[in-house]
């Protein structure tokens, strides 16, 4: 009988990756959060600073950051100016999918950090000969470790919160929580600390923090990266697997090999 693997990440990202492995496991892909662009005056001020040449480097931490920034620039009839700005200001992305979304929208990518980790991004930026000001495009729940790491490396960091993460208590999420409580889930996969936070908040609301170890008993927990593992451990959740390389493809490969 095939194992049931629940991936707590965006279905549009994870479902295509799971298709080739359907003979090995039954996959459930559902996100406990939804992203909402932060279309406010702060983003307008960011664009003013960007167009005036304040930043030496832009960093897009994920495809959602690209989509949010592009959508808000388009709402202001400034997409062409944003595209032009990325030809003057270096744009660094994290991971191939972020690079692809940037290119799709006509943004010029200078370089790509190969893994979605703080260490990978800092290493990518530190290859530059000089330090300057970096604008970090990300969610309103981004880890402070990234900002600290960049500042420790000599960068001046401006955090640009381009989208908010909100709890998504969808029917699919409710169904997954029911199934988990009934013992019908074998593996939980957490892509980011934000997904950990949102999922465990919903689970604890249902069963109580004291019952969390019992609900997760016998469930294999996989975390994509050190920061995700650390967030799980803050809740007292034992992490069974972290991939050697922090990409969705490597996580699935290593997880299914162990199964």
Image: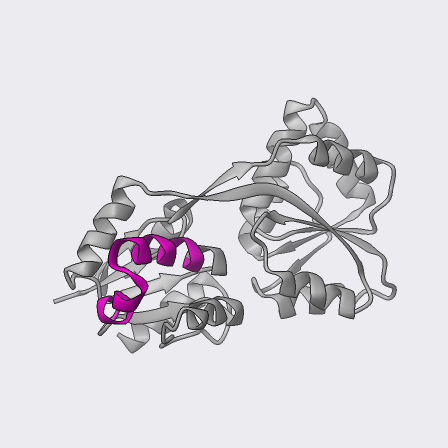
Q: Which image quadrant for residue 157?
A: bottom right
Is residue 87 positioned above or below 187 on the image? above
Quadrant where the C terminus is found in the figure: bottom left
Is residue 131 positioned above or below 43 on the image? below
User: As drawn, is 25 to the left or to the right of 81?
Assistant: left
Q: Which image quadrant for residue 254?
A: bottom left
**Residue shown at 88%/64% (left/top)?**
130
User: As drawn, is 105 to the left or to the right of 213?
Assistant: right
Asked whether residue 101 appears in the rendered view, the answer is: no
Range of the magenta residues? 196-216
Q: Nearer the viewer, residue 245 or 42?
A: 42
**Residue shown at 53%/68% (left/top)?**
227
Asked whether residue 244 appears in the rendered view, the answer is: yes
- Horizontal and vertical percent for residue 110? 73, 52
Q: Is 197 covered by the magenta stretch?
A: yes
- Horizontal and vertical percent for residue 75? 64, 24
Q: Which image quadrant for residue 69?
A: top right
- Horizontal and vertical percent for residue 177? 24, 53
Is residue 101 positioned above or below 195 on the image? above
- Horizontal and vertical percent for residue 56? 83, 51
């Amino acid at each position: 009988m095939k194992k049931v693997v629940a991936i707590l990440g965006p279905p549009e990202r994870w479902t295509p990756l799971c298709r080739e492995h359907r003979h090995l496991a039954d996959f459930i892909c559902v996100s406990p959060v939804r992203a909402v662009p932060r279309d406010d005056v702060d983003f307008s001020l960011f664009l003013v600073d960007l167009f005036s040449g304040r930043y030496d480097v832009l960093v897009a931490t994920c495809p959602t950051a690209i989509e949010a920034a592009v959508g808000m620039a388009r709402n202001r009839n400034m997409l062409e100016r944003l595209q032009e700005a990325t030809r003057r200001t270096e744009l660094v992305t994290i991971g191939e999918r972020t690079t692809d979304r940037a290119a799709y929208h006509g943004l010029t990518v200078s370089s790509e950090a190969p893994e979605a980790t703080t260490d990978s991004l800092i290493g990518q930026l530190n290859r530059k000969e000089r330090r300057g000001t970096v604008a970090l495009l990300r969610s309103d729940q981004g880890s402070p470790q990234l900002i600290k790491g960049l500042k420790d490396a000599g960068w001046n960091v401006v955090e640009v919160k381009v989208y908010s993460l909100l709890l998504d208590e969808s029917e699919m999420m409710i169904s997954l929580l029911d199934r988990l409580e009934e013992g019908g889930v074998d593996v939980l996969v957490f892509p980011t600390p934000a997904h950990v936070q949102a999922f465990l908040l919903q689970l604890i609301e249902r069963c109580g923090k004291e019952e969390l170890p019992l609900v997760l008993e016998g469930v294999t927990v996989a975390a994509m990266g050190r920061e995700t593992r650390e967030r799980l451990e803050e809740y007292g959740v034992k992490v069974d697997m972290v991939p050697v390389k922090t990409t969705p493809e490597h996580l699935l490969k290593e997880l299914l090999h162990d199964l």
